[in-house]
Image (spheres, helix red, strand yellow):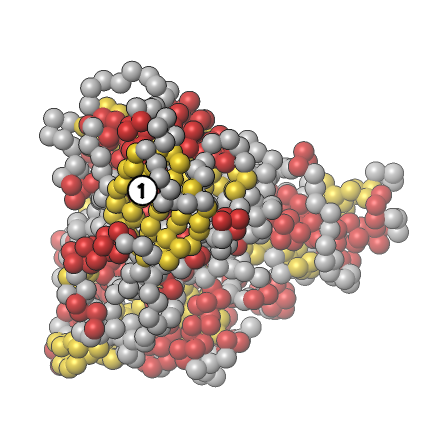
């Protein structure tokens, strides 16, 4: 059965088991590997994508729930890697190993889209589903504040 | 380079949808080729180039390619290594491209472990850059027919001041290619450093922020299948019976294959079990769930953490093998204090679980793509597993989504290679998070017994430390009874306390799971015990814990454990060049106390705790400020860390390693606990094996790097050991309750 969705602005038809988690449909079928597997149970946020603009853990939702919706991955938030969040991330050299950072950035972008001037508590609340084992949290917090200042 | 590889590279690009940005392309593909091979590939239209050594290739378009032979797992080595080489080479940073080297002895030691990349290879890297620079100088001198010592290299060009002539590095390539490779060269003086010591931006920043960075888990090969493996819950267990009928009926499942049985000792060999191969990850996972396996669980099925904890504490409570002895630690004293510390197994839990892709070619050769910290061990292990000569094995090193010691062990790479050979097509093995947590090479569970004796004036005169934990050596040899000397060298044998009577004993502890390295290794529990116990003594004596710590460290002096009979490896480096310097240890303790405003008034329910520890040739002091709420729960409110790592190459990456170490240390202090029941690990994912999240972390982690002219020490690991003791010492200051066991979560404090 084909699942139709708009993936990073492109009408996309994925011929997959509708129960397949969106994560694997994005990675294995659509071939977009920026979205990461790390827990498989919506515990760590590495697989965060936007479904109709809302941050979702793609490892824990079947691809069928995205049918007819728009899905944005890390590859789709800017054409040139220069979304204000991406710029702030680079200016502060946030990433260490980088693996969780796609998910972190997707959560941060979603936060700023609904709340352009987040408080510290807002940031913690929006980002607490994203684990970074390298421990880049303090720079993530700073980068979100910087991106918010740049946007506002 | 074979035709097959060229085709697969293009195919790989298409399939992964990679945009082919320079660094990503280089990392993924050029890593498989030597400079000479690249230059020889006609379809690539590579510029002619010259390779002054295996680490540098200068192209005639002026680009300097630097081969990073160390694995990038977040420490920033692809940036720092290039900084050192580019600096000596006088290369323009904008004209440097970093390629990832394959696993090959020609690069020397590639084992990215032990915080060694800079501390052990600073001179090697400088030499790589300096000899390349000299080659450019020689080429210019030959071109202009002037003495080489009249030429200077500056900013990617050679200049002859007397005649006003200049030539860019790219222009000199053709001439240089006819010259011999210089073996050694003079290094720049420190005052002339252009990049060393500067906070250069991470070269992979764009890839990291756009999802184009390639980790092992992202590798896709033509005709590849996805494999997941169900392994016996107990180490050494075997498949007693298998019914794979239902699994084979899952749409997308291609094959079900029984893995070779595990070996004793486990070494880096495959762990046995049953693999499901499918056309996508989801089908593989579904197939795996449908397997019906009965296990013969074997001798380790009796392993239970509750029972073992009692055994371990009993072992540490009785005399063990004396590993270090000074004076008489049993000497008569006025007052004695004793305590036992316990810390559990831990899992490294890198965000990218182990993953590797492998292909066995028609000629029998094997190529793997893997997130490995140890590319040469991966090559040897794959060769051994497949019965190949290692020359027939190519190990391509991807980025690592975290390592922390887990990816030093290439068992998962052996699995992929073995399955690729057996299946006759490319295979990617992906470990699940549960696989990672349950089947790892665990940080050792430990018990530490301490006894100190004070004279009538409260001065510590005797110190007895017994340490008991299953040895990493048990992973490599059968029947290892307990801790080995090299493990006691990790934060026990170089005991810094200024006491006339000192004894260190190793107490037996058998292993029932695979034991392996985890970021800072035995330093974690040795520092936890020693720095916690010293804090106990301070309070017993009624002394300020910071002043007492500095008193215990004593006057500035160099310690040689050999003088007390200790077989101290000093992290594999010369003790004369990298002494155990108590002055530097006291220095970081004093500095971090100043940073934290030690001695200031704190509200009720708040406390400061301090710890300082030397590891991997560097010295780190840490202060934690904690609060305890009405429910008795602890919160780390603030954290300060000061490192003396000698000369540092990239201060921003050192700061980031200290920030990360603080958070890694918080995770193990607050949450980390791997337990076994019936030989099987109980925890499985981030719900049962939590790590610190953003809301638990102080708003800022204050870091400081001591200015130093000393030789470089390690950076990746040394920040971790003092964190847990600083937190428990702060908890005592806040609550009056002493914690001698990790994690705090198990005591109801989190």
Count of marks overlaid on the render: 1
Residue B298, image x, y percentages:
20, 75
Q: Closer to the camera, B663 or B281?
A: B663
- The local secondary structure at tag 1 comes to strand
Quadrant including the C terminus of chain B: top left
Q: Closer to the camera, B688 or B19?
A: B688
Q: Looking at the image, which residue is at 79% across and 54% down? A: B139
Can the viewer see residue B406 in this picture?
no
Query: Is residue B485 rendered to the left or right of residue B237?
Result: right
Residue most extreme to the top = B601
* Disc 1: which residue: B451
- Above or below — where is A118 with respect to B242? above
Q: Looking at the image, which residue is at 17% across and 77% down? A: B296
Q: Closer to the camera, B537 or A98?
A: B537
Report which quarter residue B331 is drawn in.
Answer: top left
Query: Is residue B622 rendered to the left or right of residue A5?
Result: right
Residue B349, image x, y percentages:
29, 53
Quadrant including the N terminus of chain B: bottom right
Q: Looking at the image, which residue is at 49% across and 30% down? A: B587
Residue B583, image x, y percentages:
52, 33
């Amino acid at each position: 059965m084909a699942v139709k969705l708009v993936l990073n602005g492109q009408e996309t038809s994925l011929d997959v088991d509708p129960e397949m988690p969106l994560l694997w449909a994005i990675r294995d079928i659509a071939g977009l590997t920026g979205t990461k597997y790390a827990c498989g149970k919506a515990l760590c946020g590495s697989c965060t994508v936007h479904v109709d603009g809302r941050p979702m853990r793609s490892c824990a939702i079947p691809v069928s729930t995205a049918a007819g919706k728009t899905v944005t991955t890390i590859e789709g938030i800017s054409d040139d890697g220069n979304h204000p969040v991406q710029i702030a991330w680079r200016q502060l050299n946030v990433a260490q190993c980088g693996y969780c950072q796609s998910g972190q950035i997707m959560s941060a972008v979603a936060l700023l889209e609904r709340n352009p001037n987040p408080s510290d508590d807002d940031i913690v609340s929006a980002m607490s589903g994203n684990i970074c084992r390298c421990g880049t949290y303090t720079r993530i917090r700073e980068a979100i504040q910087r991106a918010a200042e740049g946007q506002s | 380079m074979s035709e097959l590889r060229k085709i697969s590279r293009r195919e790989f690009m298409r399939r992964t949808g990679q945009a082919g940005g320079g660094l990503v392309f280089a990392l993924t593909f050029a890593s498989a080729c030597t400079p000479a091979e690249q230059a020889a590939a006609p379809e690539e239209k590579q510029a002619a180039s010259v390779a002054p050594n295996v680490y540098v290739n200068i192209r005639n378009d002026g680009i300097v390619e630097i081969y990073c032979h160390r694995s990038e797992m977040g420490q920033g080595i692809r940036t720092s290594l290039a900084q050192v080489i580019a600096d000596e080479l006088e290369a323009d940073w904008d004209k440097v491209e970093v390629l990832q080297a394959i696993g090959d002895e020609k690069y020397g030691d590639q084992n990215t472990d032990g915080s060694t990349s800079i501390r052990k290879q600073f001179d090697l890297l400088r030499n790589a850059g300096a000899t390349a620079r000299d080659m450019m100088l020689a080429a210019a001198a030959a071109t202009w027919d002037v003495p080489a010592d009249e030429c200077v290299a500056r900013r990617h060009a050679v200049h002859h001041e007397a005649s006003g002539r200049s030539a860019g590095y790219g222009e000199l390539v053709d001439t240089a290619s006819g010259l011999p490779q210089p073996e050694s060269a003079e290094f720049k003086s420190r005052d002339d450093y252009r990049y060393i010591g500067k906070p250069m931006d991470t070269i992979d920043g764009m890839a990291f922020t756009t999802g184009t960075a390639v980790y092992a888990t992202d590798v896709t090969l033509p005709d590849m299948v996805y494999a997941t493996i169900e392994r016996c819950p107990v180490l050494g267990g075997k498949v007693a019976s298998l019914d794979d009928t239902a699994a084979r009926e899952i749409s997308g499942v291609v094959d079900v294959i029984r893995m070779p049985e595990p070996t004793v000792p486990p070494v880096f060999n495959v762990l046995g079990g049953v693999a499901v191969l499918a056309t996508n990850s989801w089908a593989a996972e579904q197939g795996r769930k449908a397997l019906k396996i009965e296990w013969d669980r074997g001798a380790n099925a009796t392993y239970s953490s509750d029972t073992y904890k009692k055994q371990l504490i009993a072992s540490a409570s009785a005399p063990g093998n004396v590993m270090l002895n000074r004076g008489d630690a049993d000497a008569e004293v006025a007052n004695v204090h004793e305590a036992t510390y316990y810390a559990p197994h831990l899992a490294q839990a890198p965000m990218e679980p182990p993953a590797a892709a492998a292909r066995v070619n028609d000629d029998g050769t094997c190529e793997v793509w893997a997130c490995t910290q140890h590319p040469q061990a991966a090559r040897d292990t794959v060769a051994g597993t497949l019965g190949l000569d290692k020359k027939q094995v190519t190990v391509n090193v991807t980025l690592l989504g975290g390592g922390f010691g887990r990816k030093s062990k290439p068992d998962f790479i052996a699995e992929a290679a073995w399955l690729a050979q057996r299946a006759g097509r490319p295979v990617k093995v992906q470990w699940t998070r549960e696989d990672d947590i349950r089947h790892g090479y665990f940080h050792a569970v430990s018990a530490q017994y301490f006894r100190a004796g004070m004279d009538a004036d409260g001065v510590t005169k005797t110190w007895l430390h017994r340490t008991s934990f299953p040895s990493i050596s048990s992973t490599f040899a059968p029947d290892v009874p307990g801790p080995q000397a090299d493990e006691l060298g990790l934060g026990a044998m170089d005991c810094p306390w200024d006491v006339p009577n000192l004894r260190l004993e190793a107490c037996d502890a058998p292993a029932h799971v695979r034991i392996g390295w985890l970021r800072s290794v035995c330093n974690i529990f040795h520092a936890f015990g020693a720095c916690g116990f010293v804090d106990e003594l301070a309070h017993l004596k009624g002394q300020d814990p910071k002043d007492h710590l500095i008193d215990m460290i004593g006057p500035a002096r160099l310690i040689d454990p050999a003088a007390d009979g200790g077989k101290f490896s000093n992290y594999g480096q010369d003790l004369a060049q990298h002494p155990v310097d108590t002055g530097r240890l006291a220095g970081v303790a004093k500095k971090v106390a100043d940073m934290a405003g030690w001695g200031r008034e704190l509200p009720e329910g708040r406390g400061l705790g301090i710890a300082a520890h030397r590891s991997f040739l560097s010295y780190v002091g840490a202060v934690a400020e904690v609060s305890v709420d009405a429910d008795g729960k602890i919160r780390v409110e603030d954290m300060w860390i000061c490192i003396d790592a000698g000369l540092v190459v990239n201060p921003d990456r050192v700061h980031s390693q200290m920030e990360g170490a603080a958070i890694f240390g918080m995770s193990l202090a607050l949450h980390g606990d791997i337990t076994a029941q019936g030989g099987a690990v109980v925890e499985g994912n981030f719900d049962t094996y939590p790590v610190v999240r953003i809301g638990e972390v102080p708003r800022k982690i204050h870091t400081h790097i001591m200015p130093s002219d000393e030789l470089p020490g390690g950076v990746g690991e040394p920040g971790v050991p003092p964190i847990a003791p600083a937190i428990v010492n702060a908890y005592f200051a806040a609550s009056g309750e002493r914690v001698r066991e990790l994690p705090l979560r198990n005591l109801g404090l989190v």
